[in-house]
Structures are given as C-alpha cells and as structure tokens.
Amino acid sequence: MILICTVGIIVVVALAILAAFMFLPRLQDRLFERLAARRLAAAPALALDDKSLQVYLCGTGSPMPDSSRANTCTAIIAGGHIVLIDAGPGSWTRLAAARFPAHAIDTVLLTHHHSDHIGDLGEVAVQSWIAGRRQPLDVKGPEGTLEVVNGFATAYTLDAGFREAHHDACHMPPDAARMIPELIPTPAPGQFVPVYDRDGLRISAFLVDHHPIDPAFGFRAEYGGRVAIVSGDTTPVPNMVFASMGADVLIHEALNRSMVGMIASALAATGDQRRSDMLTDTLDYHTSPGEAAEIARKAGVSLLVYNHIVPPLPNALARRMFMRGVKDIAGPVKTRIGEDGLLIRLPQGTKEIETKDLL
Ligand SMILES: [Zn+2]
Ligand SMILES: [Zn+2]
C-alpha cells in the first residue's frame, strides 16, 4: 500500500513538472537558455592546438543516394589549420554538426571536378566566412579549377553582398568572402607536387587514374612524422602504392563491383535499361575494396579506411558483402568502412591511431 502511494505521488509530481514546462513560457525559456549555455560552453570535440595529424570524414558517400552519407569530403587538421579535400554535396552539414572550428578552414583541395566532389564548395566558402575566417579561401585543384571556382563565386556574389550589407565589415571582412583559385601542375607518375606548407603541415598532390576525367589527383598529408593519404576517385594504379608508401592511414575510395552489378541487373529486369547501362559504366573507373586492400598491403599502410562507398550499405548484411574477402588480401593492414563523422587522430612521435565518432 505504501509502495503504491509512493509511486502515485512520484507520478503526480512528474506530471506536474511536465505540465509546468509544457505550459509556462518562463520555465521553457530558462531551460532553453541553460541548455544552450551548457552546449556552447562545452569544449569542441576537435582541438585545433592538438599536436597530432587529424583526419575527419565529412563525407563518405558517392553519387548513389544514401541518407547516412554526405558526398565526398575529408578534412585534414594539423598545426592550427584545416584543409578540406573535396567538398561534396551535404558535407558542410557534417562539418557543422561536429561543431567544427570552420574559421580555420583556409584551403580546399579538389581531387577532380565531378559534382559529388565540388557541390558544397560555395557553402564551405560562405559558412567558413560566417564562422570567422578573415582571409580569402584558397582553392587548388587540377585543370578546370579556375572555371569551377569562378562559377561558384559568381553564384554567391549576391549572397556575399547581402551579408556585407547586413553585418559590419569588422564581423564579415569583405575580402574574406573571396575564393582564390590556383591550378596544381599535373605530376607525372612517381612524382609529388607540393600544394600546401604551413606550420608543419605539408600536403602534396599525386596523379591517379579516373579516365576520362584527366587529370585527377590524390593527396598525401604529413605532419609531425605522421602520414595520411586521400585517394580521390581512381582505378587501382601502381602510383597509389608509390604515393601511400609507409602511410599511417589511407582513405581510399571503394566500389564493390559484384554488388553494383547485381543492382544493374535488377534495374534491367525492371525495364530501366538506361539506368542499368549508366550504372554499369561506373564499374571501370573505380577501385574495389579488395584492390584497395592490396594497395594498402603493398604500401605498408597501417589503417585502410574506405570512403566514396558504392553502393550504399543500409545494414550489416550489405556491409559484410562489401567487405567480402578483404581480410585475406589486407594481411596485417587494419581495414574499416568509413562513416561520416569519424575522426582519426595520429599523435606525433607515436605509432598510435585513435578513432572517435564526432556525430
Ligand atoms: Zn569522380
Ligand atoms: Zn566521385
């Protein structure tokens, strides 16, 4: 009897508190204020002064629709700087959701100009400006980069004017709205072209093969003796082994041909021969999970992380099919499917690789 009374009192009190919050605006405001203050006071998950090379996956998807993945984007964080490699559609939201210190994004490197790698370039430029970037944004990439950057700049000219009119120049310095495009000279196989060198963070471009998209690049980032590679879109080429030699982490694109082939067959069976043919066309300019594992093993990479995942992997069964046979090929290389929000931390002077989900 005492127990029933106690439970009854607790339920009544809980309902009274709930009703108070539902119907009393002052209480709602106080709660909201408190929660906002607590969230904003919390230290960001990503520290810019961290003495490590960090890699954040801001987009691990591909043009095939996948609600769990933004299109391709990888952030390199070191020496107080953030460099984005590609800015595919939806990737800005993955940076914002992780409360990224976006003011520190000073450069975007483009592997090539497929839409799934450049679609959020305008958003990255305007949002990093809003976040406090005070210098123009450097954008470097292969042939065509000037046209791409100028196109985005034109599309965002009105937006920049609106913001300058609405805020003062101290908060939104007009010069920082600009993007400065720069062409990266095409390296020969077996060569690197330096593209970034600030406060110990050095990044070089190397050639990959995404024919008929020529040239297309991958990037090698080095800081404090640690190395991370981003493949961009490519078929499996010997130059990927050369460029990845001894790296701590290789972020490599991957397309599972047998799964994509099954989807193409299913499309043909439903009478959609056009989409079936177009999907089949994608098979010859990407790398399979097994081929990427072989590259990683030959290069002596410690950790291989797949991105640009094709096809979408909605459940554990699909993930298992995607990774079929990889372990046997990879040998001592650790492998995993990349997910949006994954932060990989490589502390200086160690061989450690730490991972954390920021979303
Ligand atoms: Zn591509
Ligand atoms: Zn792509």
Image (cartoon, helix red, strand yellow):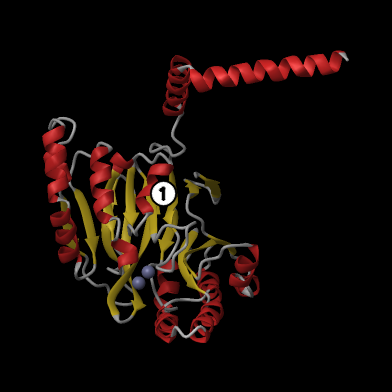
Q: Is residue 288 visible?
A: yes
**Where does residue 111 sit, x and y in percent of width and height?**
31, 66
Residue 232: name its quadrant: bottom left
Where in the figure is residue 223, as x and y percent of width and height? Answer: 39, 50
Tell me if residue 47 comes above or below residue 137 in the rendering. Answer: above
Q: Amino acid at mark 1?
A: Arg
Q: Based on the displayed image, in which of its 4 quarters is residue 3 positioned?
A: top right
- Residue 325 lies, with reference to residue 312, above or below; the image says below
Instruction: Give the quarter the ligand 2 occupies.
Output: bottom left
Horizontal and vertical percent for residue 167? Answer: 16, 32
Residue toward you, 151 or 327: 151
Residue corresponding to mark 1: 94
Identify the residue at image location x=40%, y=63%: 230
State the residue at coordinates (76%, 17%).
Answer: 8
* Local secondary structure at mark 1: helix
Residue 247 is at least partly visible in this image: no
Q: Seen from this angle, which residue lies furthest right?
A: 1
* Residue 190 sits above or below residue 87 on the image: below
Quarter of the picture holding the N terminus: top right
Q: Position of residue 206 (x, y in %)?
A: 33, 69
329 w.r.t. 137: above or below: below
Task: Report if the beta carbon of the residue with label 1 is closer than 8 angstroms to ligand 2.
Answer: no
The quadrant holding residue 191 is bottom left
| Number of numbered labels in the structure image | 1
Nearest to the observer: residue 123 or residue 30: 30
